[in-house]
Image (cartoon, rainbow, N blue to C red):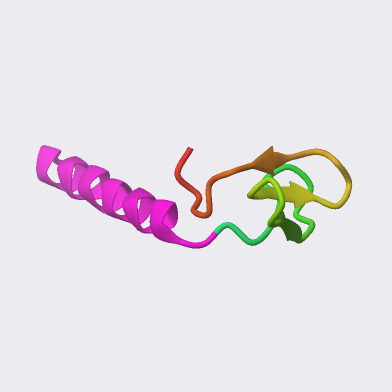
Amino acid sequence: MSNEQLVAILQEARQMRAEDKERALVECPICGGPLDYRPRDGTYNCRMGYFATRKATQEQ
């Protein structure tokens, strides 16, 4: 692979990561189960109890 190909792969990976960060967080990143929103405290929670966050996107 040439350096240009490696740079292109790196740029594509960065673009894909940026797009992933903007997507809505709808499933638990640990078990894959759906997240429930609790308006009283503003958190998204996994039904199995593995994950909780206040962020609405996948940005970590």
Taking depth in this image into account, of 59 and 14 the one nearest to the observer is: 59
The reply to whether the magenta stretch includes residue 6 is yes
Q: Quadrant of residue 35?
A: bottom right
**Relative image position of residue 47 (x, y in whole percent):** 86, 52
Question: Residue 21, position in %: x, y?
Answer: 42, 51
Q: Quadrant of residue 52?
A: top right
Q: Residue furthest front?
A: 40
Relative depth, front residue between 22 and 52 = 52
Which region of the structure is painted magenta?
A: 1-24
Residue at the spot 21% in from the left edge and 48% down from the top edge = 11
Secondary structure that dominates the magenta span = helix
Residue 46 placement, left or right of 44:
right
Foreground residue among 55 and 10 = 55
* Residue occupying image coordinates x 12% and y 38%: 3
Name the spot of residue 13 as percent of width and height, x first: 32, 48
The quadrant the N terminus occupies is top left
In depth, the one of 16 and 44 nearer the eye is: 44
Query: In screen coordinates, is 55 left or right of 2?
Result: right
Residue shown at 37%/49% (left/top)?
17
- Residue 60 in picture, x, y percent from top left: 48, 37
